[in-house]
Image (cartoon, helix red, strand yellow):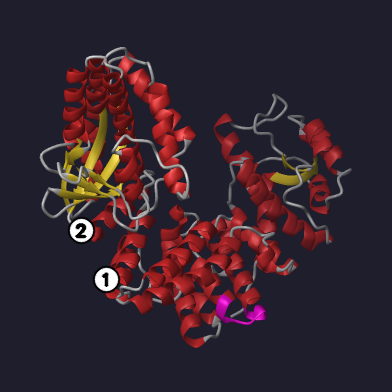
């Protein structure tokens, strides 16, 4: 099975860094069931949320898999257990639940055959055996099932009282997530209806499907190790729902220390509002930025440990939730310049646009603290500082982002403790003029949809200094012209080995109206000079002062730009 071998090798490579894992295996769904094992969705994990698109995608995968007599890889299933009997489903509950509902829909098809008088004895036995193998045991007195799968507090009642019993499904007075489960069962019941003629064929479908759907099973001993798994896999591009684990921990604290349902309901409402603001997958990132604004810097892998160490009582949970709600507004607004949160303040909007243009996340802790705890004037000062510092440090000099994040977090913590902004704390990460000018003089940019705007911004700021022109970085009419073309014609005498390095130099780029850029194309420098003189941009017109355009001219122009840049992106401490 080459696919499964590939995933096994991938897992072996990645689990080198996953301490605390009890076991890792690649197993099919059928082998997970039986032997008295239970799979429990933690009480406060997210509700069932799959809808038609996901149901159909899974069904298409299953039908193609069975037609080709192949297997299908379902991804990671993260389980937590201390006894190898009861397993908490830390990640994978949506897939696990949906597969179980498919099996129940197929079992109901067998039940219907029996009720129609088609091989009733054999089909009753099939129904009983399949239910025992995949769903659970039935109590002969209460006729309730001791289910293999136990869902969360919002889903389990409807699942065990209606879906598992294969009777008429309750349609009124049910929640949104219960409606999804009902629709899911009915959707698969419909696609399975009359698909097979006999109970044996339905039973074969269940067995083949269960034995061909494979998971990579990661088993951990506690939620701390589960969180490490999340962070490790997320860092490798496998997005898992670590926010569910955080939620379950916080809610469990409140449930353990109080019997008042109103507190749980209140906490649920706050959580819903928070996830509505952020989306569940952004919560761990947001929590880390928030946490680092009030505590010494923690890495992603240590975040959950620090939360558990600090938050141990219900009152702390509610205080944390209230603060998270408060800070979530600014966290979201930092990603959107035109957010109403900024009240149309043009100075703030300008710098928030640059924050996103530069794709800066390291200053979030500082900016969140500054916005919430300082006067507006000090927030603006902090915002301008991080833009200028990051421009020098990250955009031009390409320094280590971890170092600058630690510096920003130190200032954030100082703001939280003193309610003042001390700009001098950032002096250690401010690239001095000599180093900045040296890096600027040799800076290169490979032009794409993102870097076009950065180059447009840089050239626009130099133009503004020279001529007072304000350049719109989003206006594609303000195009980036490569003076020495990226693909020069024979009239350009340039070493082929140097074309890429020279054409991508910042000194080889200028602002030019699109209509002139199209005419300039790959023409020789003399033709281009005539077009540059017609431009509205003063810095572009000045290129015509050069007699020829070669490596020396590019270096000379870029060195002059660097001297101007020192004054434009300058801070005093």
> Residue reaching furthest top?
197
* Number of numbered discs on residues: 2
Residue 301, percent across and down?
31, 60
**Could you tell which of marks 1 and 2 lies nearer the N-terminus?**
2
Residue 235, percent across and down?
36, 49
Q: Which residues are magenta?
A: 372-378
Residue 374 is covered by the magenta coloring: yes
Q: Nearer the viewer, residue 443 or 260?
A: 260
Q: Find residue 441 and report its image quarter.
A: bottom right
For the question of whether residue 329 can be seen, the reply is yes
Residue drawn at 66 percent across, 56 percent down? 559
Q: CA distance from mark 1 to mark 2?
A: 17 Å
Residue under label 2: 222
Residue 338, percent across and down?
69, 59
115 shown above or below 137: above
Residue drawn at 51 percent across, 62 percent down? 273
Residue under label 1: 256
45 shown above or below 59: below
> Residue reaching furthest bottom?
418
**Which one is in front in this view, the residue at disc 1 or the one at disc 2?**
1
């Amino acid at each position: 099975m080459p696919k499964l071998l590939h995933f096994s090798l991938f897992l072996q490579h990645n689990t080198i860094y996953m301490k605390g894992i009890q076991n890792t295996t690649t197993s099919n769904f059928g082998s997970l069931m039986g032997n008295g094992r239970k799979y429990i969705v933690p009480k406060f994990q997210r509700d069932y949320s799959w809808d038609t698109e996901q149901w159909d995608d899974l069904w298409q995968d299953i039908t193609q898999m069975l037609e080709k007599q192949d297997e299908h890889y379902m991804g990671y299933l993260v389980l937590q257990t201390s006894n190898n009997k009861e397993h908490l489903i830390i990640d994978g509950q949506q897939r696990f639940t949906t597969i179980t509902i498919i099996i129940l829909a197929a079992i109901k098809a067998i039940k219907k055959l029996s009720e129609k008088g088609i091989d009733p004895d054999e089909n009753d036995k099939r129904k009983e055996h399949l239910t025992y193998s995949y769903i659970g045991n039935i109590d002969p007195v209460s006729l309730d099932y001791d289910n293999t799968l136990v869902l969360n507090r919002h889903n389990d009642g409807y699942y065990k009282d209606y879906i598992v019993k294969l009777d008429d499904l309750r349609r009124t007075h049910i929640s949104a997530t219960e409606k999804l489960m009902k629709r899911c069962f009915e959707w698969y019941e419909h696609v399975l209806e009359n698909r097979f003629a006999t109970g044996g064929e339905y039973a074969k479908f269940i067995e083949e499907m269960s034995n061909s759907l494979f998971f990579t099973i990661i088993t951990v001993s506690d939620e701390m190790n589960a969180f490490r798994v999340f962070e490790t896999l997320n860092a490798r591009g496998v997005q898992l729902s670590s926010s569910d684990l955080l939620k379950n921990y916080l809610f469990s604290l409140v449930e353990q220390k109080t019997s008042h349902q109103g507190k749980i309901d209140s906490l649920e409402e706050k959580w819903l509002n928070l996830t509505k603001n952020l989306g569940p997958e952004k919560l761990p990132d947001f929590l880390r930025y928030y946490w680092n604004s009030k505590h010494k810097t923690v890495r992603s892998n240590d975040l959950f440990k620090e939360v558990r160490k600090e938050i141990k009582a219900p009152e702390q949970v509610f205080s944390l939730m209230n603060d998270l709600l408060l800070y979530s507004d600014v966290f979201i607004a930092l990603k959107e310049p035109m957010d109403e949160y900024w009240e149309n303040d043009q100075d703030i909007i300008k710098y928030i646009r640059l924050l996103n243009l530069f794709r800066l996340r390291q200053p979030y802790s500082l900016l969140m603290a500054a916005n919430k705890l300082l006067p507006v004037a000090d927030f603006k000062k902090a915002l301008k500082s991080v833009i200028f510092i990051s421009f020098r440090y990250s955009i031009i000099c390409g320094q280590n982002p971890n170092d600058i994040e630690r510096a920003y977090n130190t200032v954030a913590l100082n703001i939280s403790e003193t309610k003042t902004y001390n700009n001098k704390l950032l002096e250690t990460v401010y690239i001095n003029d000599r180093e900045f000018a040296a890096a600027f003089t040799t800076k290169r940019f490979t032009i794409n949809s993102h870097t076009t705007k950065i180059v447009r911004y840089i050239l626009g700021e130099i133009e503004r200094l020279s001529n007072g022109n304000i350049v719109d970085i989003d206006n594609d009419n303000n195009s980036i012209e490569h003076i020495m073309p990226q693909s020069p014609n024979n009239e350009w005498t340039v070493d082929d080995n140097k074309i890429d390095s020279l054409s991508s130099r910042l000194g080889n780029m200028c602002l030019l109206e699109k209509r002139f850029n199209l005419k300039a194309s790959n023409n020789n420098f003399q033709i281009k000079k005539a077009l540059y003189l017609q431009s509205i941009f003063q810095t572009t017109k000045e290129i015509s002062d050069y007699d020829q355009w070669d490596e020396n001219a590019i270096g000379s122009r870029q060195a002059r730009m660097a001297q101007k840049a020192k004054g434009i992106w300058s801070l005093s401490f």
